[in-house]
């Protein structure tokens, strides 16, 4: 019996030793992976560095390209698009004005009642309408007839306090957020459809003319006075609220900017100089694929450090991690980073993540967002340099207001703060004091109505 006991004890002793060896091996393996994870983070952080000296080079290069883009079509890597908007709202506009905002699978129709000087926007109403899939791929007439019919219904519901007593035809501001070659304030040729639309016969046609014909078929007497996009609309809306607004920026999935340029500074402009001596230019900056950049680095980290041979299949899907998801994880303030854990589980089907791993994921969000925000600040500096508003002129009381809109700027607080702090670094404290960034809502809707008002053919009659 004693021998058996000793034998068992010895066997157990060997088993314990083997288990300990396995645990030690696993810890070493895990430690090695963690070292690799930290190496990837450090390498990524280094590649995303945006020192002020580099950002100033970006701004300078952008200003040079802006000059080239104003000189000739195709003369620059940047698109400097003529908007044909030569007068922004002043606040003196008075009367009833409509807007149509077509930017995707839904469109909106709006009406605003403007009260003139000191009156502002007295009243506004809008209606949102879904576009049936068959209208997005059918004929041009079918699409615009559907839009015109809904607009006619909206006009028919006009309440007494909106009705115009002037007896003149109603006017419409038309926001059309598709690639267009604009040829005047109220005309533009469709270059191609996007966002699920595919109607070949409309490509190469004037979209204002297509809408006008549809309005006529509905028996609706309404003139399109302005064709605009959301960036220019944001500039108009901002200017209406604050006369010091001279730049508008949309920071969303895509990023555009529009600013006021002197007409004499546009060599490629061959028409008559506008009475105002100014022209609005839309500056296309770049797409903001923050969530996708984050997914790609996470994909590498998952394969080389976190999960080894177990490669989460969902993580391989492009754009599965949208920027709103990244923002939610970045802003997670819970002690155990529960928001991060839930998003990883619900979207990527990755469970049982450690707090240590979740902290690294928040760090990656910060690296990506900070890089994007600082590059956007450099782009903004480029525009301010082009306008001569990056310095203070002696003896002048300069004030520059930038109207900002877009989900990225509005909802991603860390991104917004990083952008504004970086702009302050780039400009210096003294100049930054002359710059104000204001959040401007609904440029694509209200802005179109306001541009309708500022380009009304009856504007002189009101005055």
Image (cartoon, rainbow, N blue to C red):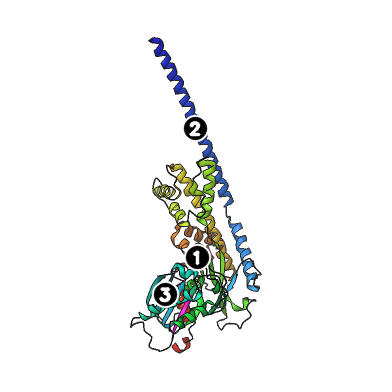
Question: In the rendered image, which residue does mark 3 sit on?
Answer: 109
Question: In the rendered image, which residue does mark 1 sit on?
Answer: 196
Query: How far across and how far down the image is residue 2, in percent?
Result: 39, 10
Query: How far across and how far down the image is residue 127, in percent?
Result: 38, 73
- Front-lying residue, 273 or 299: 299
Disc 3 to disc 2: CB gap under 8 Å: no
- Front-lying residue, 62 or 436: 62
Q: Is residue 137 above or below residue 425?
A: below
Numbered disc 3: secondary structure? strand
Numbered disc 1: secondary structure? loop
Q: CA separation, marks 1 and 2? A: 50 Å
Among the two numbered marks 3 and 2 on one chain, the one whose residue lies closer to the N terminus? 2
Query: How far across and how far down the image is residue 52, in percent?
Result: 58, 57
- Residue found 52% across the figure and 76% down from its top: 207
Q: Is residue 92 left or right of residue 255?
A: left
Which range is magenta? 164-174
Q: Nearer the viewer, mark 3 or mark 2?
A: 3
Judge the density around disc 1: few (<14), some (14-19), many (≥20) Cα neighbours within 10 Å: few
Q: Which mark is residue 26?
A: 2
Looking at the rendering, which quadrant does residue 35 occupy?
top right
């Amino acid at each position: 019996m004693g021998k058996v006991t000793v034998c068992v004890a010895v066997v157990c002793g060997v088993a314990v030793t083997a288990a300990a060896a396995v645990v030690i091996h696993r810890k070493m393996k895990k430690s090695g992976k963690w070292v690799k994870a930290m190496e990837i983070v450090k390498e990524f952080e280094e590649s995303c560095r945006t020192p002020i000296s580099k950002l100033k080079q970006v701004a300078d290069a952008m200003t040079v390209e802006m000059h080239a883009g104003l000189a000739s079509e195709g003369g620059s890597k940047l698109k400097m698009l003529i908007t044909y908007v030569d007068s922004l709202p002043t606040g003196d506009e008075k009367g009833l004005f409509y807007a149509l905002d077509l930017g995707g699978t839904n469109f909106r129709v709006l009406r605003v009642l403007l009260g003139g000087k000191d009156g502002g926007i007295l009243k506004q109403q809008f209606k949102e309408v879904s576009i049936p899939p068959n209208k997005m791929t059918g004929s041009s007439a079918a699409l615009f007839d559907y839009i015109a019919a809904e607009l006619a219904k909206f006009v028919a519901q006009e309440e007494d306090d909106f009705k115009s007593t002037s007896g003149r035809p109603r006017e419409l501001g038309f926001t059309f957020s598709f690639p267009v070659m604009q040829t005047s304030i109220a005309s533009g040729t469709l270059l191609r459809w996007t966002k699920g639309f595919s109607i070949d016969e409309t490509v190469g046609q004037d979209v204002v003319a297509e809408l006008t014909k549809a309005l006529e078929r509905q028996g609706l007497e309404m003139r399109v006075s302005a064709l605009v996009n959301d960036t220019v609309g944001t500039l108009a809306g901002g200017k209406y609220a604050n006369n010091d607004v001279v730049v508008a920026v949309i920071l969303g999935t895509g990023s555009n900017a529009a600013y006021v340029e002197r007409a004499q500074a546009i060599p490629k402009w061959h028409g008559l100089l506008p009475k105002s001596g100014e022209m609005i230019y839309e500056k296309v900056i770049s797409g903001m694929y923050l969530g996708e950049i984050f997914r790609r680095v996470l994909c590498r980290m998952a394969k080389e450090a976190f999960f080894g041979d177990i490669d989460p299949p969902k993580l391989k899907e492009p754009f599965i991690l949208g920027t709103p998801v990244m923002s939610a994880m970045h802003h997670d303030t819970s002690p155990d980073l529960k928001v991060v854990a839930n998003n990883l589980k619900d979207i990527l089907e990755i469970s049982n993540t450690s707090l240590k791993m979740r902290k690294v994921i928040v760090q990656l969000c910060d690296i990506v967002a900070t890089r994007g925000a600082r590059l956007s600040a450099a782009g903004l500096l480029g525009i301010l340099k082009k306008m001569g508003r990056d310095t203070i002129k002696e003896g002048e009381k300069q004030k520059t207001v930038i109207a900002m809109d877009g989900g990225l700027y509005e909802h991603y607080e860390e991104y917004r703060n990083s952008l504004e702090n970086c702009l302050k670094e780039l400009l210096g404290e003294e100049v930054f004091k002359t710059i104000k960034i204001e959040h401007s809502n609904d440029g694509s809707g209200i802005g179109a109505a306001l541009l309708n008002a500022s380009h009304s053919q009856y504007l002189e009659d009101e005055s």
